[in-house]
Image (cartoon, rainbow, N blue to C red):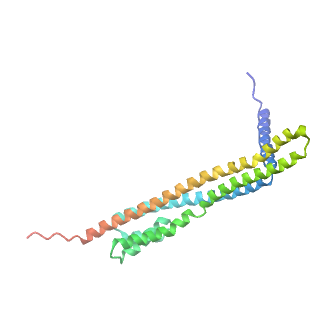
Amino acid sequence: MPSLDPNTTSTTTNAGGMDFYTTVVSFLQDGGPFMYIILVVFGFGMAIAIERFIYLKTTKAKNQMMWKKLFPMLSQGQFKQAMETAKTSKSAIARILVYGLQRSTFAKRHDEIEMAMEEGLMEIIPRLERRTQYLATFANIATLLGLLGTILGLISAFTAVASADPAEKANLLSQSISIAMNTTAFGLMAAIPLLLLFTYLQSQTTDIIDSMEMATVKFLNVFRQAQSKQEKPAPKPKQ
């Protein structure tokens, strides 16, 4: 049975890593200056995607924790205690409930409470959607930059081939075209992940907004039930 030499395995791994690094560097260098521009666009897009991912996940977790604290209080009619708890929280759902609880102290109609909570929701939605739309824009820019780089590369390739030796024209043209197509390939490689991240972050944003709207409906239902119990006349004592 052949023995595995760790030194040989390590050397093979290092060689494979160096080959991959060399291939990537050669791919970027052959594509021309547009490759680096696309790389910068991709870097900005990934930075925004990571920041938005962390923000949305944090917001969702805070909302879930706060709702688990507030809903039992609301169900038991402890609205003052729920308001004090919500005021101490920085979660989005707590701010919406504060709007509704504050308005409920003097509102005569349920529509006024609902409008107040919708006002709070309208203030929060732009914070959830902030910068996410840039990912789609960066994906389109990366694709267009790739096409532009390819077109300019083809123009320079045909210009160079025009004055070359007829016997070498075919080889030079095929090499120039393959290099020029690098920018299109790299543009698509940058655009596809950005579009996928854009779709994912949009779905996460929609889920958070839907959960806050559901919390608003549940609060209004609980508040109506509490009011109906207070307005219900006490039973008359039997004579």
The residue under the point 72% across, 51% down is: 147
| In the displayed structure image, the side of residue 61 where residue 183 appears, left or right | right
Hey, which quadrant is residue 52 in on the image?
bottom right
* Residue 153 % position (x, y): 80, 50
Q: Is residue 8 visible?
A: yes
Q: Is residue 56 above or below residue 239?
A: above
Number of numbered callouts drawn:
0
| Residue 232, horizontal then vertical, whole percent | 22, 70
70, above or below 2, in the image: below
- Residue nearest the viewer, comparing 229 with 133: 133
**Residue for point 58% across, 64% down:** 130
Q: Residue at x 80, y 38 (%)?
A: 15
- Residue in front for this viewpoint, 9 or 161: 161
Residue found at the very far left of the displayed protein: 239
- Report the residue that reaches farthest toward the right: 165
Image quarter of residue 73: bottom left
Camera-side residue: 8 or 178?
A: 178
Residue 46 appears anywhere in the view: no
Q: Is residue 140 above or below residue 25?
A: below
Residue with the most extreme top position: 1
Residue 222 percent location from the top left of the image: 34, 64
Q: Position of residue 72 (x, y in %)?
A: 37, 62
For image coordinates 30% across by 68% down, the residue present is 226
- Quadrant assignment for the N terminus: top right
**With 179 as the anchor, is 210 left or right in this view?**
left
The quadrant the C terminus occupies is: bottom left
